[in-house]
């Protein structure tokens, strides 16, 4: 009997350790008050405006996100600032347009931290208001003070120094080494006898690479893209790594680990106000979802990854419900940039597209100045508080800082986060009017004002090229002007017809640039 009893204790202890629900009743505080709702920002990676059924997709079904949208606000003019990841994330973290600062473009996987450790950040706004803050998922804003760093010790500064009480991340992208989890400052499950080293310039160690040993790959890299350095889990990566064998995640379990960590964070903090930034990796390359999702969408691994993403969002919604905090939890769902099909691997995204349109009615995609680069799914749900509807308000993730500062009565020091505008009323559906202007960053900068969009002249190629991602960049050596209300697909360049409009918008852009 004693042994049985002990067993039960051990099992309970194990369950608590695994699920993180070990908070004793006496230690519990009151749940988040209604004026300080929990905020969960779920950010997908490379998900397009047309990738969800609630945004018009017919070849794929995303029931959980459809439900989130149906119970909240579905924004049709919601944006990230930039058509790639790092600058978009820099923008919502700092409230500043990324193109103001050099070094905010796509980073190598060993880059140093690019977010200042002093100064306002989105999570710090919540921290100052007494929230517990956490990030789970993709980081990609650099780590440490130097590129050269010891990955085997404490790795900082990083998310914990820029406003997160808790962090469970991978450093860069899933296609870049090191393919490990970092919890707070240290790589998880790292065996000191097998130290890890990373190099982005020259090969280190003696592990096979995609270039030398393509026969070892389970997912072929697309020729010309690279993605042919160290092979991890049968997939060629960008960058070289050696060591840390046990610590490496496999692609199939990595998103599930993130999901569990996100659920734990919700469970552990259900009695106080919290801010969780849950940075999903789907459907970014390499698309290698958990095996139960493989082949389920009929659209190749990209579609399967979207099904997994939708499921994970449903799991978070369930967790919020189980925790009993549905009525005081605001969930935002969006994406860090627009869609891409072939971003480096032969994963069926192109060959099995089957008529799916990840960009919806928009032109371009990831890397593009056209709308599909930065206009992304954007959903806000807060049951009981936010009335379900569709909003055409022009809003951007960069506005989170000023909006939540307003909600929480926090001041932003002068000169900080100054590109962030208070859009709280739009985010909560009290108005369908948003920003009057927004600067968008593809390769070229664009400015939107009202119905008009002006794309600055740019000498870059008009297409990333059929041998690469094959996306229209929006580059043109002459000005482009579109009326988005009449021409959402940006087909009809009106620059010659309305030279005054071009002048007005280009002058306005210069003013904003010089701010
Ligand atoms: C590019 C990679 C692409 C992807 C992207 C970052 C090549 C040819 N392409 O440089 O595969 O990793 O960087 O994507 O290396 S993002 O969504 O994180 O910005
Ligand atoms: Ca991205």
Image (cartoon, helix red, strand yellow):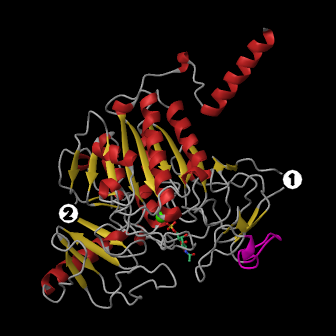
Q: In this picture, is 126 found above or below 365?
A: above
User: Is 210 covered by the magenta stretch?
Assistant: yes
Q: Determine whether the residue tagged by mark 1 lies in a helix, strand or loop.
A: loop
- For the question of whether residue 88 can be seen, the reply is yes
Compare residues 365 and 127 and report the one nearer the observer: 365
Q: In this picture, is 502 found above or below 55?
A: below
Residue visible at 58% across and 27% down? 21
Residue visible at 77% across and 57% down? 244
Residue visible at 23% across and 42% down? 388
Badge 1: how crowded within 10 Å, few (<14), some, or many (20+)?
few
User: Is 452 covered by the magenta stretch?
Assistant: no
Q: In this picture, is 482 found above or below 295?
A: below
Q: How far apart, in angstroms, are the residues tagged by discs 1 and 2? A: 57 Å
Q: Position of residue 455 (x, y in %)?
A: 28, 80
Q: Quadrant of residue 38?
A: top left
Q: Which residues are magenta?
A: 202-216
- Chain-order first, disc 1 or disc 2: 1
Magenta stretch secondary structure, dominant: loop
Q: Which residue is mark 2?
A: 436
Instruction: In the rendered structure, find residue 193 and report the number of the disc placed on it.
Output: 1
Observer-side mark, 1 or 2, equals 1
């Amino acid at each position: 009997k004693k042994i049985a009893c002990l067993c039960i204790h051990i099992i309970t202890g194990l369950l608590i350790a695994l699920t993180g629900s070990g908070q004793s009743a006496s230690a519990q505080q009151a749940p988040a008050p209604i004026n300080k709702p929990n905020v969960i920002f779920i950010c997908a990676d490379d998900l397009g405006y047309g990738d969800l059924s609630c945004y018009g997709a017919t070849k794929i079904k995303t029931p959980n996100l459809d439900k989130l949208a149906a119970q909240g606000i579905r924004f049709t003019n919601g944006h990230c600032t930039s058509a790639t990841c790092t600058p978009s994330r820099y923008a919502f973290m700092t409230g500043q347009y990324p193109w103001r600062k050099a070094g905010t473009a796509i980073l190598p996987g060993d880059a140093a931290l690019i977010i200042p450790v002093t100064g306002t950040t989105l999570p710090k706004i919540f921290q100052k208001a007494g929230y517990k803050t956490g990030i789970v998922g993709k980081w990609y804003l650099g780590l440490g003070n130097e590129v050269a760093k010891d990955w085997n010790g404490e790795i900082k500064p990083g998310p914990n120094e820029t406003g997160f009480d808790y962090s469970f991340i991978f450093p860069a992208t899933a296609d870049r080494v090191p393919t490990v989890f970092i919890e707070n400052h240290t790589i998880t499950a790292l065996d000191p006898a097998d130290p890890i080293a990373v190099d982005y310039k020259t090969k280190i160690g003696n592990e096979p690479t995609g270039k030398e040993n393509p026969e070892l790959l389970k997912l072929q890299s697309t020729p010309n893209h690279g993605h042919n350095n160290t092979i991890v889990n049968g997939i060629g990566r960008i960058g070289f790594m050696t060591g840390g064998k046990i610590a490496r995640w496999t692609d199939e379990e990595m998103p599930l680990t993130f999901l569990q960590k996100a659920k734990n964070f919700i469970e552990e903090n259900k009695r106080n106000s919290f801010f969780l930034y849950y940075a999903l990796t789907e459907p970014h390359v390499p698309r290698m979802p958990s095996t139960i999702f493989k082949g389920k969408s009929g659209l190749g691994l990209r579609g399967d990854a979207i099904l997994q993403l939708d499921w994970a969002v449903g799991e978070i919604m369930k967790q919020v419900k189980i925790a009993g905090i549905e009525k005081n939890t605001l969930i935002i769902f969006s994406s860090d940039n627009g869609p891409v099909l072939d971003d480096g691997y032969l994963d069926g995204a192109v060959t099995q597209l089957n008529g799916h349109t990840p960009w919806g009615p928009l032109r371009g995609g990831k890397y593009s100045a056209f709308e599909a680069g930065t206009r992304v799914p954007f959903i806000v749900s807060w049951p009981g508080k936010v009335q379900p509807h569709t909003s055409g308000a022009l809003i951007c993730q960069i506005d989170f800082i000023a909006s939540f500062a307003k909600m929480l009565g926090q001041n932003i020091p002068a000169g900080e986060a100054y590109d962030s505008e208070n859009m709280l009323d739009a985010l909560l559906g009290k108005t369908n009017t948003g920003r009057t202007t927004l600067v968008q960053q593809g390769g070229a900068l664009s400015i939107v004002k009202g119905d008009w969009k002006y794309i600055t002249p740019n000498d870059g190629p008009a297409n990333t090229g059929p041998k690469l991602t094959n996306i229209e960049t929006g580059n043109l050596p002459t000005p482009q002007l579109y009326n988005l209300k009449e021409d959402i697909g940006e087909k009809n360049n009106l620059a010659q017809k309305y030279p005054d409009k071009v002048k007005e918008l280009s002058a306005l852009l210069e003013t904003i640039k010089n701010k």
